[in-house]
Amino acid sequence: MTKATIEAPSQAATQSAFRSSSIFNELGMKQDPDNLYLQTIDAVLTAAEILELPHHVKIILAQPKNEIMVHFPVMMNDGKYHLFKGYRVQHNNALGPYKGGIRFHHDVSLDDVKALALLMTMKCSLARVPFGGGKGGVKCDPRSLDNDELMRVSRRFITAISRHIGPDIDIPAPDVGTNAQIMAWFADTYQGMAGSSSRNDALGVVTGKPVDMGGSLGREKATGQGVVDVVSEILPSMGLPLKGLKVSVQGFGNVGSWSGRLIEELGAKVVAVMDHTGAIRNDEGLNTEVLAMHVAETGGVAGFGASHGATQTGKHTQEGAQAISIEDFYRTPVDLLIPAALEQMITPENADWIDAKVIAEGANAPTTPAGERRLLERGIEILPAILCNAGGVTVSYFEWVQNKTSTYWDVEKVDADLNRHMVMAARRTQLAKQRYEVDLRTAAYIAALEQIGKVYAMRGIFP
Ligand code: NAD
C-alpha cells in the first residue's frame, strides 16, 4: 500500500466526524473527533445552521475571545516551590460580563476549559441571565493539598489572572474541586488588590461565596435545585410523576448530592449512586441526607453500607447499601439517571448498559457524541446540561445583583426566582424542539442562540 492510499481514508474519516468542518477548515482548526471543544462547537454550529445565523456570528462563536494561560510558583509545606499551570478562557461577552466556574483538577486542559466556557455562553443565554461565558482551571489535585497549600494556590492563581477579571468584566465561581471557602480566598485576595474606594464593589468579583461573606442563600444547592426544577417541569408530561420515581446519581459532590437530596424530598427514590470511590445500591431508596454526611466524613460513597445501617440479618436498612460494580451501577433499572461527575463519562459502551428512561445532565458534557447517538437510538431522552445545570449560574446572577445593591434576599425569593428561570428555560427548549423537530440538546442550543443572534443583529460589529 502506498503512503497516499494510507492517508486518504483516515483524512476522510476525520472530516466526516464533524458537521461544521467547513468552518473548522476556514479557521484552521484541527479536526480531532475526540476533542471536547471541537465536539461542543460542532453541536452548537449545527444548531446555528438550523437557525440560519449569519456566517460572521458562527465564526465569532467558534473561537473564544480570550485564552489566558498562567504559570505561578507556590511554596509547599515542605519548603519547596511547585510551579502550577492555570487557565481562564473568556468565550463571549455579547450578553454581559464573562461568567463561569474555576476548576481545580489534575486533568484540566486548555481545550476542555474552552469547551466549558462555550457551554457557559450557551447556558447564560438559555437561562436569560445577563452574562457571557467563561471558565477557568488550575491543574492540581486539591485532595493532595492541605488547607494552607490550597489557600496559597488559590490566592496566587487569582493574583495571576487579576488583570483580566472584575465584577463588570469576568466573574468566576466554584466548579469541580473548588468551593465557597476557595471563593472567599479569591474575593479577599482580589479585594486586597483593589483600591480602598472600590473595595466594596470588588466583592462581586466572584460568586458562590460563603453566605456570611456576601454569598447568596440558596447558592450552594442551586445547581441541584435547578436540575430538580427542570425534571419536575418535564418528566410528569412524559408520564413520569416524581412520586416513586427511581433515580440513580453519578457523582455525589455539590451537584449530585443536592440533586439527590432534593428529588428525594419530592417523593423520588435514589436507588444507586456512584463516585470516584465506588458505587452503591439500595432498591428501597438510599437515605441521601445520611449518605451526604458519610461523603463529607470519608471523601466518597464507598463503605456506606458497612458504616451506616448494615444489619445483622444481612438486609440493609434505608441507611445501608450494598457495594456494586461500576457496570452494575449503569445497569440498575431506573426512570432517571443524573450524571453529576465529570465530562465524557457516558460512552457508547456504557450507553448500552444504561437502563433508564431519561437522563438529566447535571454535569457539563457528560455524554460523548457517540454515547449520545447510542442513547437516542435506544429511545432514552436526554435533558441537556445547558438546561439542567443552569441553576448554579442563575443564583450566581442573584448573588451578583445582591452584592451590587447591598440588599440580601431570603431563600424563598431565591428559590422562587430560580424556579421561574428554570421553568422558562425548559419551555424555551421544548418549544424549539417542536418548532425545529430536533433533539432536546440541539433545541436548547437553538433557544440560546436565538437570543445571541438577536443581540449581534442589534449591536452590529464595531467599527
Ligand atoms: P464536585 O467536585 O463537588 O463533585 C464531583 C463528583 O464527581 C464527586 O462526587 C467525585 O467523586 C465524582 N467523580 C470524579 N471523578 C469520577 C469518576 N471518575 N467516576 C465517578 N465519579 C467521579 O463537583 P460539582 O461542583 O458537583 O460538579 C460536577 C459537575 O457539574 C461538573 O461537570 C461541573 O462542571 C458541573 N457543574 C457544577 C456546578 C456547580 O455549581 N458546582 C454548576 C454547573 C455545572
Image: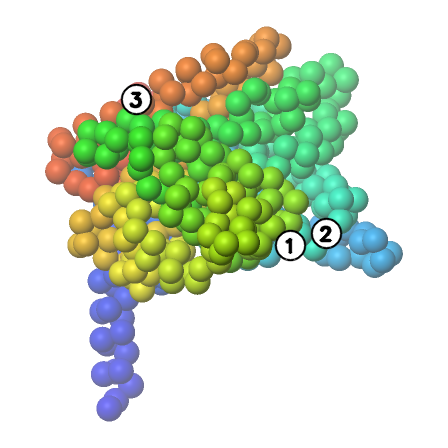
Residues tagged 1 and 2 counted as in contact (Cβ below 8 A) = yes
145 is higher (above) or lower (below) than 186: below
Give the residue pinned by disc 2. 145
> Residue 141, which numbered label?
1
- Distance from the alpha carbon under mark 1 to that under mark 3: 38 Å
Residue sitting at the far right: 79
Q: Is residue 194 visible?
A: yes
- Distance from the alpha carbon under mark 1 to that under mark 2: 7 Å
* Residue type highlighted by circle 1: Asp
Position of residue 340 measured from the top left corner of the image (x, y, whole percent): 44, 44
| Image-quadrant location for residue 302 | bottom right
Position of residue 346 measured from the top left corner of the image (x, y, whole percent): 36, 55
Q: Residue at x 77, y 17 (%)?
A: 196
SS at badge 3: helix
Is 319 in front, or is 441? 319
Is 163 in front, or is 80? 80
> Residue 424, which numbered label?
3
Q: Residue at x 42, y 49 (%)?
A: 282
Q: Residue at x 45, y 18 (%)?
A: 415
